[in-house]
Image: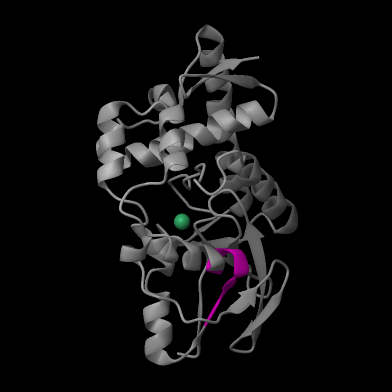
């Protein structure tokens, strides 16, 4: 092993990178923002969530039971799930060319799932190592993160899909981080966009009938019932859809007793 490429900061992708790098004395190559995220989250460990983070959960419509559950989980569990990275890394940037085994791969970054997720594009063989940016069956989680409560990750996600579609050939072979390889990059990207646009339209319609909190949107957005285990993820994803409608002028929010109620414009 001579080096380790990491696509993004999520623990199921970066969790063992530090362990492997330290064990094999090799450099971790990853996007600087993603690398800094790991360093930040590892350092950010507290017994209870900070006040502003709890306030955001109230804003999303958490009831007392879910708030208590969230508090009991502690804050900064990321550090418990990942190994420590070495102090230095090698930076991967959008557009950069990286030579691997005599072949050149181009780094392409996308947003929305994480801030600057790196993919590796092989123009020589028509292959893209896509990480979580392009998955075959499931839709990548697009959530509001506590570090940027006012952001529009779904907007970043849709912009990234347009970027990848414009830059890459239609029939590339995609090597995703979850599921099996598949060909037909453009078809998959188009399906992903259609799915999101359809859900946004349905959500806007629902907001015309009555104001909704993020937690009221689960049934409309998700095919499966939302259990306690995925409640936080679901709330983050619902918020991302509401924020996108708000950012694009299709919805407005009114805060009552700390709770965000969204309605159509
Ligand atoms: Zn991920």
Q: Is 100 within the magenta?
A: no
The quarter of the displayed image where residue 128 is located: bottom right
* Residue 32 shown in magenta: yes
Which quadrant does the C terminus fall into? top right
Identify which residue is drawn at 47% across, 17% down.
212
Q: Going 47% across and 24% down the picture, which residue do you hit?
A: 258
In the rendered view, tell whether residue 150 sits above or below residue 40: above
- What is the x, y in percent for residue 214? 45, 27
* Number of numbered markers: 0
Residue at 37% across / 80% down in the picture? 19
Toward the front, the furthest residue is 51
- Residue 137 appears anywhere in the view: yes
The foreground one among 85 and 193 is 85
Q: Where is 76 relative to 63, above or below?
A: below
Instruction: Name the residue located 38 percent from the left edge and 62 percent from the top edge.
Output: 12
| Colouring convention used in this rendered image of the protein | one colour
């Amino acid at each position: 092993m001579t080096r380790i490429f990491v696509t993004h900061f999520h623990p199921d992708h970066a969790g063992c990178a530090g362990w492997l790098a330290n064990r094999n004395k090799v450099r971790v190559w990853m996007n600087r923002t993603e690398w800094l995220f790991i360093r930040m989250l590892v350092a950010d460990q507290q017994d209870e969530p900070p006040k502003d983070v709890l306030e955001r959960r109230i804003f999303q419509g958490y009831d007392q039971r879910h708030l208590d559950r969230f508090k009991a989980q502690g804050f900064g569990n990321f550090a418990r799930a990942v190994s420590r990275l070495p102090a230095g890394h090698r930076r991967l940037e959008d557009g950069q060319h990286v030579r691997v085994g005599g072949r050149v791969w181009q780094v392409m970054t996308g947003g929305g799932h994480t801030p600057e997720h790196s993919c590796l594009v092989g123009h020589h063989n028509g292959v893209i190592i896509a990480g979580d940016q392009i998955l075959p069956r499931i839709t990548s989680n697009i959530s509001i993160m506590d570090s940027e409560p006012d952001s529009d990750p779904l907007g970043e996600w849709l912009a990234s899909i347009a970027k990848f579609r414009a830059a890459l050939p239609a029939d590339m072979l995609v090597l995703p981080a979850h599921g099996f390889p598949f060909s037909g990059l453009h078809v998959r990207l188009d399906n992903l966009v259609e799915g999101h646009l359809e859900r946004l339209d349905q959500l806007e319609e629902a907001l015309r009938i009555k104001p909704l909190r993020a937690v009221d949107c689960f049934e409309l957005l998700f095919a499966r019932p939302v259990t306690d285990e995925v409640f936080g993820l679901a709330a983050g994803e619902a918020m991302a859809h509401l924020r996108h409608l708000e950012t694009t002028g299709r919805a407005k929010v009114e805060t009552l007793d700390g709770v965000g109620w969204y309605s159509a414009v």
